[in-house]
Amino acid sequence: MTADLEERRGSGAERRAAWLLLSPALGAILLFFAVPLVAALFLSLTDFDIYALADTANARFVGLENYLRLLRDPLFWKVLRNTVVFVAIGVPLTLASALGGALLVNSRLAWLRGLYRTVFFSPVVTTLVAVAVVWRYLYHPRYGLINQMLGLVGLPAIDWLGNPTWATVAITVLAVWRGFGYGLVIYVAGLQAIPESLYEAAQLDGAGTWRQLREITLPLLVPTTLFVAVITTVTLFQIFAEPYVMTRGGPLYATTSITLLMYEQGFRWWNLGAAAAVAFVLFALIIAATGLQVLWRKVRKP
Amino acid sequence: MIRRRLATVAVNGALLLFALLTALPLLWMISASLMPSGEAMTLPARLLPSRPTLEHYGTLFSRLDIGRTFGNTLFLASSITAVSLLCNSMAGYAFAKLRFRGRGRLFAILLATLVVPPQVTVLPLFLEIRALGLVNSFGGVIVAGIATIFGIFLIRQFALAIPDELLDAARIDGASELRIYWTIVLPALRPILITLGVFTFLSAWNDFMWPLIVLTDQSKHTLPVALANLSGEHVQDTELMMAGAVVTVLPGLLLFLALQRYYVQGILMGSVKE
C-alpha cells in the first residue's frame, strides 16, 4: 500500500525520465527474452523441422506430441538419468570441497589466506571449453597426469573417458573443479558472519573444535549451504560444454546431457519443435529440484 | 602448545595440498604449452619443458590465424560489456530511485524470470536472429546480451543507497533527469559498474553455446568455438592445444586477478538476493 502511494507520488518529469531510462533495457528484454520465451512454448507444440526452416508454412501444430514422443524415447530417459547422475554426484562433491576449503581458508591457524582463496577461485573464471580440453589430456588413459598419479600410489589405470561409468565421473569431477571456488567464497563470507562470541562461549563450556563445528558452525551455515546447493544444481542441470568437448556425449550416450541432446536435436538435426520440448523438460526439472531444496529447508525449520 | 603447533601444520599442509591439486591443471596447461612437440605425453610424465619454446604459439598465430579469433572475442566481449553496462545502469537506477506506477510489480516480474534457463529461449531466439538476417554476424551475438535481468538487479541494489537529497538538490538546480543520471548517478555507481563489467566481460568471453550457434563462418569464430573445433582436428598436438587453451584462459584470469576485489563483492551481493 505504502509502496503504491510512493510510486504515485512521482512527478510527471520523473515518470517520463523513468520510462526513457528503462526503455532500452526493457525493449531488449522484451524482444530477445520475453518473445522467445513465449515462442518457445508454441514451438514445442509444433513439428518445426528443417523443412519449416525453409518455409514456416511447413510447420504444423501437433499438440503434446513432442512431449509424448520424448516419454517413449529410451534415449531421452538415458539422457535424463545421465543428467540427474551429474547433479547427484556433483552437488555433494561441490558442497564438500567448498565447505572444506572454506573452513581451512578461514581457520585462524592458516597462513596466506588471501592467496589460497584466489587459487581456489581461479578455476571459476576460466573458459569451460579450454579447461575441458586440458582435462581431456589429464584423463588420457596412458599418458595422462591423473592415471600416472594414481600409478604412483599403486592404483590401476582407469579408462576415464572410454568407459561409460568413469566418463560420467570424469566429467563431474571437471565440473566440480571448475565450480567449487564459487561456493567456497560464499562459505567464507558465511563463516565470517558467525559471531566470534558464540565460539568463545562454547570454549568456556569446554566444547572442543569438533563440537563447535557440529553445533555452531554447521547449523548456522544451513542457509548458505542451501544457496550454494541450489546454484550448483541449476548449473549442473545445464551441463553442456564439458561433454561436448570431452566425449561428444559418448561412449554409448553415457555422458549425453539434456542440454547436449537439445543442442543436437535443435542445431544439428534442426528438429526445433522437438528440441523446444526437451528445453521445457529441463526447465521443469530445474524448478522442481530447486523447489524441493527450498521446501526441505522450510519443513526442517520449526 | 605442541597440540596447537601440530594443528597449524595440519591446517597449512592440507591447504597447500588442496591448493596444489586445484592449480595443477592450469599450471600443467602453461608448462605443456611451452614444451617441444611430443613432450607433454610421455611416460613418466614431465612436469617442466626440457627446453621452453614458443613455437606452438607461433603456429597458432601464423598458421591458424588465432590473432583474428582473439580479436573477434575481444571485440564481442567489449561491445557486450559496454552496451549492457549502459542499458542495465539506466534501468537499475530507474527501478531504484525514480517513482513511477507499476514499478514494484514490474521489478518483481523481471526477478521471477531469472529462473528461466537460457536453453528455453535459445531456439526461438535463433529463429528471430535468422529472420533479422543476423546469423553469422557479430550483431547476432551482441543482441542477446544487450540487457540482463541480473545486471539490472545488481545495479538497483547498489543505487538504492544513493541519497535522495543529492538528486533533489540537482533537480532544484534545474538539471534534467538525463543529466542527473549522467553526471551524478553514473559516477556514484562506479564500484558496481566495475563489478558488473568484469562479470559481463568474463561471461561473454567464455560463452560457448550462443556464439557456436550464431557464428557459422570460421573467420568469425570466438576463442572457445575455435578451440572446440581445433581439439577435434589436432587431438595429437597436445602442446599446440595447450597453447590455444592458454591464449583462451589467460586474459580472463588476468582480468580477474587485477579486479578480484570487485568480482568477489559482486558474488556476495548476488548471493543475498535469496
Image (cartoon, rainbow, N blue to C red):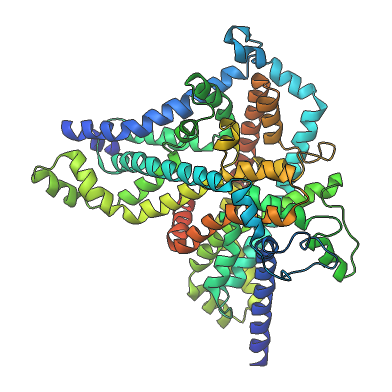
Give the residue at x 80% y 67%: B45
Residue at the spot 42% in from the left edge and 27% down from the top edge: A30
Q: Could you tell me which quadrant the N terminus of chain A lies in?
A: top left
Is B244 situated left or right of A146 in this image? Answer: left
The residue most toward the bottom is: B1
- Based on the displayed image, in which of its 4 quarters is residue B42 positioned? bottom right
- Depth check, front residue: A139 or A261: A139
Whether A148 is drawn above or below A13: the answer is below
Residue B245 visible in image? no
Q: Name the spot of residue B87 as percent of width and height, x first.
A: 35, 38
Depth check: A280 or A218 in front? A280
Residue furthest out toward the left: B173
Q: Residue at x 13, y 47 (%)?
A: B170
Residue placed at 65% from the left, 45% from the top? B227
Q: In the figure, is residue A299 to the left or right of B79?
A: right
Residue A135 sits above or below residue B217 on the image: below
Q: Is residue A247 above or below residue A278?
A: below
Position of residue A74 measured from the top left corner of the image (x, y, whole percent): 82, 27
- Give the side of residue B113 with respect to residue B154, left or right: right
Q: Quadrant of residue B106?
A: top left
Say whether residue A71 is left or right of residue B81: right
Q: Position of residue A204 (x, y in %)?
A: 56, 82
Total number of numbered discs in the rendering: 0
